[in-house]
Amino acid sequence: MNFASYAACDENSRGRKYDEPSPAHRSNFQRDRDRIIHSAAFRRLEYKTQVFVNHEGDLFRTRLTHSIEVAQIGRSIARALSLNEDLVEAIALAHDLGHTPFGHAGQDALNKCMQKVGGFEHNLQSLRVVDVLEERYADFPGLNLMFETREGILKHCSVKNARNLGQLGERFIDKTQPGLEAQLTNLADEIAYNNHDVDDGLRYGLIDVKQLQDVPLFANQYQKVLKKYPDLNPRRVIHETIRRMVNEMVVDLIETSRASIAQLGIDSIDKVRDHNTALISYSESMQEQTQAMKRFLRESMYHHYRVKRMTAKSTLILTALFEVFMGDFQLLPPQYRQKTSASDSEVDQARVVADYIAGMTDRYALAEHGRLFAPDQPS
Ligand code: MG
């Protein structure tokens, strides 16, 4: 594989926490990607909400399809910039492993429940899944991933939490940058959700094409499509528009990033990390357009009353589950109950409950809520 001098690779990696011999016929980052795909947390992504709760319909994105889209977009960009595609794929497939059921509503609810005992943050939880919670290998806890994969998974982190993370936390304290593969996957995530949320929002009827005429990113491509294909059916016009939006964002990102890397003479991963800003970025005009799209989605879609209702319901469910387990650990399934003992601090006990709840899929959380609260359901 011919990587650029600024790419992360086996040779310049900071390695794994527990030393292992390199695989015979794969790179270390291919191994990371493979371990993520074989994890239980990865399989659960299929039944976790992106924006829409799983039972709302079969065509909406789930965390799994979202993660696959991020990997696809990320790999295209990585290949164009001669970066480490396998690393990008590994980060993309793992970036949402720590998400609670019910999307951001679930994360906010759990964070509120955990306020006095350290809070809950899905990025940190994704790291916790791959570092600790997956129990699969004989020689180490978690998946024992490469430093660069873990660096990419931990997109954000408070300075307070970063202090407990050793080398991985340093960049949040020193305000330095992660490798280019991490920077890239972060933006591939954004490209994926900005576009698929428009698609899902239109399909669900939360937003309409008329409103989107005020969002230049959509409107420009939409007008071009209508002009070229005046008789195309509306559904295909939307797909064609979204496909062009994805392409426009990806091309802008590749060209802008390639130019800044060349202009600044970046030729090593150390220079990437020491540079004062992220090198993977959009042009100024694309930056403005994506901000406008995000603002639109926040105001018109994420705050739509029907989404708010889903949010409210999930908050009630997760809060009730947290409180009932904190009130009596005997109600936890044995494999989680074994992790707590009466002598544990409240902080440790709450973390076990949070791990259990965060690991649930949407439908499992609903079923567990039924088993604990619905008088007419078996326990
Ligand atoms: Mg994501």
Image (cartoon, helix red, strand yellow):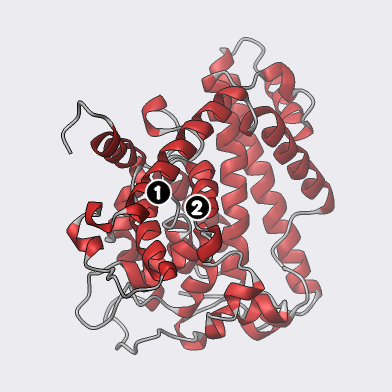
For the image shown, how many numbered marks are present on the structure? 2
* Residue plotted at (63% across, 42% down): 247
* Pointer 2 local density, CA inside 10 Å: few below 14, some 14–19, many at least 20: many
* Pointer 1 local density, CA inside 10 Å: few below 14, some 14–19, many at least 20: few
The quarter of the displayed image where residue 20 is located:
bottom left
Whole-percent x and y of residue 12?
52, 87
* Residue plotted at (35% across, 77% down): 144
Whole-percent x and y of residue 133?
33, 67
Whole-percent x and y of residue 79?
54, 62
Vertical position of residue 167 compared to residue 107: above or below: below
Give the residue number, with chain letter if any, for mark 2: 113
Disc number at residue 323? 1
Relative side of 336 to 199, left or right: left
Label 2 to label 1, Cα distance in Å? 8 Å
Vertical position of residue 88 compared to residue 177: above or below: above
- Asked if the residue under mark 1 is in contact with the one under mark 2, i.e. CB atoms within 8 Å, the reply is yes
Label 2 or label 1, whichever comes before in sequence order: 2
Under circle 1, the secondary element is helix
Vertical position of residue 222 compared to residue 314: above or below: above
Whole-percent x and y of residue 372?
26, 39
